[in-house]
């Protein structure tokens, strides 16, 4: 505990520097959220100064504590902390807050500044990602640590706003964290009673403490965000609790020190105004005529923080060298995990499926592939939203991740798809190669987290089964229609819909190599024929996103393009066209984005511009396919919701038959 006046003066100087930098940056940008950084500067300072183990000069040090600003609108709080503690952010960067190409974006963005652990802003996402960070630490601790060699041992902290507390994703994540006993997780709730519309009492009156105790959390309360001693005691207690996650509720005053805007919604999402900034600075004992003022004491403090961080890293590296000398194999695995590498020769584990006219669902084939890979890929782990038996995502013999067994590789997310998506992001940011599964129709619940996964360029693997109207009897509520188009619209997300088990196995070879983008595997519930590759072209062509699977002996006059479940029936139509003397080509296109990353010559070889008669066959929305058919083609797809009936009847009802595909092709040719 610090008691000296000198120490207290330094504390005050650092806290007020964070506050005034936030005020000035928002005012200069004429945009932003000044009130929360002003309120939480003391809290953030205590946490970073006295508890969080980090290294500004080695920001990727794996055993660092993680800090997540789920209340991402308070981004200037984080930027000010990173600047003051010596990270790669300058005063000029802060002056450029919210400007084009600035490191200091409106909300924290992963990859722009070292020290930003994840992209936040959509409320609740950071909170849920922090649960992923905590799960990753628990698993890594159990897998890598050995007696006397605690090389993984870090904590995860997240700051939440009133808005985070209201979002449903937070409830999902908190419930799971409490169930799993995440004793390495501390959430800090900024209880300032203000949102954009005004007082939280307009829409929020629950007992948050009681709610979290019901989730199985330890709950503490600090009545004043400016009380450094009580903040210190609360964080000490939270960190010492090893069997439960902890929630520290901190009462604060938004825009603390601003005489006319403290405790008002006016301070939440807009600049204070020059007069109010001046008045607040006077309240802090700051020179109101100085802008972006940084006292000399900050430089001395920064040097101390940098030195402390380098010492922590050096101590850990010495421990790791000793660990490596005694456990070279697992040390090598840790190095590979941190660098994002995959185990050597893992691709040789990928199975090859024999031709089979009866076939098997691609969800079942995926289960076989997943298990083959997982045996030699220790940090590949994941699970399902309570659908593992249906998604086929259980890793045999790997155990269940639970508070009794943090070494288990099978995660049970429960019926919490939104939190699952965000937790996958936290896992990926921690070095884990995660997968999560549910039905394709429920990707709607995950979309915000999937979007952030793509924005952060994370190699998460999303497994979506029950991919079309082929779901059958469950009917329109469970038959995805618009979902493929919706997922394909997300920049950077690789959406893969394989035609059969071998296309899927080939494309897993591609997925395994990805380091900078997520993948969505779109898999069938119903059995699909395993295509006879002695009759049709090899599945390796799938590695280019689209390939000619069946062709004519001459230049084609019509091209059939299909994906996933519909490729086999499209091949039947192709055979009928060939038998009728029509020069038909069939293209399997499991992944648009992968195909469009190929060179122009290859794309032309598959879809020559001279062949304008094209028919697309996909049991999903027709939206987007115009890019491949222009004005001279046709799409056999879905323009309305499906029906409840056996799969074959539903396919027949909507025209996904060889007869209808062949007829559509002939009708198109006869238009000339």
Image (spheres, grey):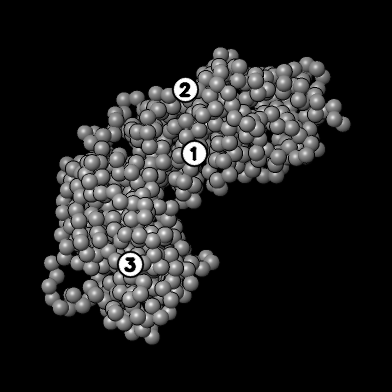
Vertical placement of residue 587 versus 88, above or below: above
Mark 3 vs mark 1: give the one in front: 3
Q: Is residue 644 left or right of residue 221?
A: right
N-term-proximal mark, 2 vs 3: 3
Picture coordinates of residue 466, whole percent (x, y): 51, 27
Which element is circle 1 on?
Answer: helix
**Quadrant position of residue 644:** top right
Which disc, if any, is residue 364? Answer: 2
Which element is circle 3 on?
Answer: loop
Picture coordinates of residue 561, whole percent (x, y): 68, 31
What residue is shown at x 43% (from left), y 79% (from top)? Answer: 274
Which element is circle 2 on?
Answer: helix
What residue is shown at x 77% (from left), y 26% (from top)? Answer: 665
Q: Label 2 to label 1, Cα distance in Å? A: 23 Å
Mark 2 vs mark 3: give the one in front: 3
Q: Is residue 186 left or right of residue 107?
A: left
Picture coordinates of residue 146, whole percent (x, y): 20, 41
N-term-proximal mark, 2 vs 1: 2
Mark 2 vs mark 1: give the one in front: 1
N-term-proximal mark, 3 vs 1: 3
Q: Are marks 3 and 1 in contact (CB under 8 Å)?
A: no
Position of the N terminus, as image quadrant, is: bottom left
- Asked if residue 438 shows in the view, the reply is yes
Q: Which residue is mark 1?
A: 444
Given residues 512 and 30, the one toward you in this image is 30
Q: Which residue is mark 3?
A: 263
What residue is shown at x 46% (from left), y 49% (from top)? Answer: 452
Picture coordinates of residue 453, whole percent (x, y): 46, 47
Given residues 25 and 595, the one toward you in this image is 25
């Amino acid at each position: 505990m610090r008691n000296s006046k000198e120490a207290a003066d330094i504390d005050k100087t650092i806290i007020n520097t964070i506050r005034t930098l936030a005020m000035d940056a928002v005012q200069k940008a004429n945009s932003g959220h000044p009130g929360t950084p002003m309120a939480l500067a003391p809290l953030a300072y205590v946490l970073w100064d006295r508890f969080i183990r980090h290294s500004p000069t080695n920001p990727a040090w794996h055993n660092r504590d993680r800090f997540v600003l789920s209340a991402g609108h308070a981004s200037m709080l984080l930027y000010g902390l990173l600047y003051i503690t010596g990270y790669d952010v300058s005063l000029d960067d802060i002056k450029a807050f919210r400007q084009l190409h600035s490191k200091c974006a409106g909300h924290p963005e992963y990859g722009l500044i070292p020290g930003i652990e994840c992209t936040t802003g959509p409320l609740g996402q950071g909170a849920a990602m922090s649960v992923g960070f905590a799960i990753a630490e628990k698993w890594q601790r159990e897998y890598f640590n050995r007696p006397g060699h605690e090389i993984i041992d870090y904590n995860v902290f997240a700051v939440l706003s009133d808005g985070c507390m209201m979002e449903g994703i937070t409830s999902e994540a908190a419930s799971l964290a409490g169930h799993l006993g995440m004793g390495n997780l501390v959430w800090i709730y900024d209880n300032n009673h203000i949102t954009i519309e005004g007082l939280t009492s307009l829409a929020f009156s629950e007992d948050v403490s009681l709610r979290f105790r019901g989730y199985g959390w330890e709950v503490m309360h600090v009545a004043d965000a400016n009380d450094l001693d009580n903040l210190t005691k609360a964080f000490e207690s939270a960190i010492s609790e090893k069997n439960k996650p902890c929630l520290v509720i901190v009462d604060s005053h938004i825009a603390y020190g601003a005489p006319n805007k403290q405790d008002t919604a006016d301070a939440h999402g807009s600049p204070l105004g020059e007069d109010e900034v001046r008045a607040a600075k006077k309240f802090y004992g700051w020179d109101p005529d100085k802008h972006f003022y940084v006292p000399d004491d900050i430089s001395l403090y920064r040097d101390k923080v940098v030195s402390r961080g380098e010492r922590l890293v050096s101590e850990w590296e010495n421990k790791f060298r000793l660990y490596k000398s005694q456990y070279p194999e697992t040390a090598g695995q840790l190095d590979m995990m941190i660098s994002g590498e995959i185990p050597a020769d893992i691709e040789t584990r990928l199975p090859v499926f024999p031709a089979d006219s009866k076939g098997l669902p691609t969800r079942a084939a995926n289960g076989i592939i997943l298990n083959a890979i997982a045996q030699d890929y220790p940090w590949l782990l994941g699970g399902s939203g309570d659908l593992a038996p249906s998604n086929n995502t259980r890793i045999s013999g790997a155990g269940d991740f639970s508070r009794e067994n943090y070494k288990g590789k099978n995660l049970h997310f429960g019926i919490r798809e939104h939190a699952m998506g965000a937790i996958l992001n936290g896992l990926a940011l921690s070095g884990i190669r995660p997968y999560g599964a549910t039905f394709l129709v429920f990707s709607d619940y995950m979309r915000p987290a999937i979007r952030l996964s793509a924005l952060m360029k994370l190699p998460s693997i999303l497994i979506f089964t029950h991919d079309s109207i082929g779901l059958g009897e469950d009917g329109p509520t469970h038959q995805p229609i618009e979902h493929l188009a919706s997922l394909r619209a997300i920049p950077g997300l690789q959406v893969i819909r394989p035609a059969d088990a071998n296309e899927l196995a080939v494309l897993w070879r591609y997925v395994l190599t990805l380091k900078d983008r997520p993948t969505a595997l779109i898999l069938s519930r119903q059995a699909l024929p395993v295509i006879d590759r002695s009759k049709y072209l090899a599945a390796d062509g799938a590695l280019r996103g689209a390939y000619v699977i069946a062709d004519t002996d001459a230049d084609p006059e019509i091209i059939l393009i299909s994906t996933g479940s519909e490729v086999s029936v499209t091949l039947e139509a192709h055979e009928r066209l060939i038998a009728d003397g029509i020069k038909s080509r069939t293209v399997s296109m499991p992944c648009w984005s992968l195909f469009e990353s190929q060179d122009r010559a290859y794309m032309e070889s598959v879809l020559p511009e001279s062949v304008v008669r094209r028919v697309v066959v996909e049991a999903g929305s027709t939206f987007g396919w115009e890019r491949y058919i222009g004005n001279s083609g046709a799409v056999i797809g879905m323009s309305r919701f499906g029906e409840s009936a056996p799969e074959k009847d539903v396919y027949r009802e909507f025209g996904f038959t060889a007869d209808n595909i062949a007829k559509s092709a002939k009708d198109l040719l006869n238009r000339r």
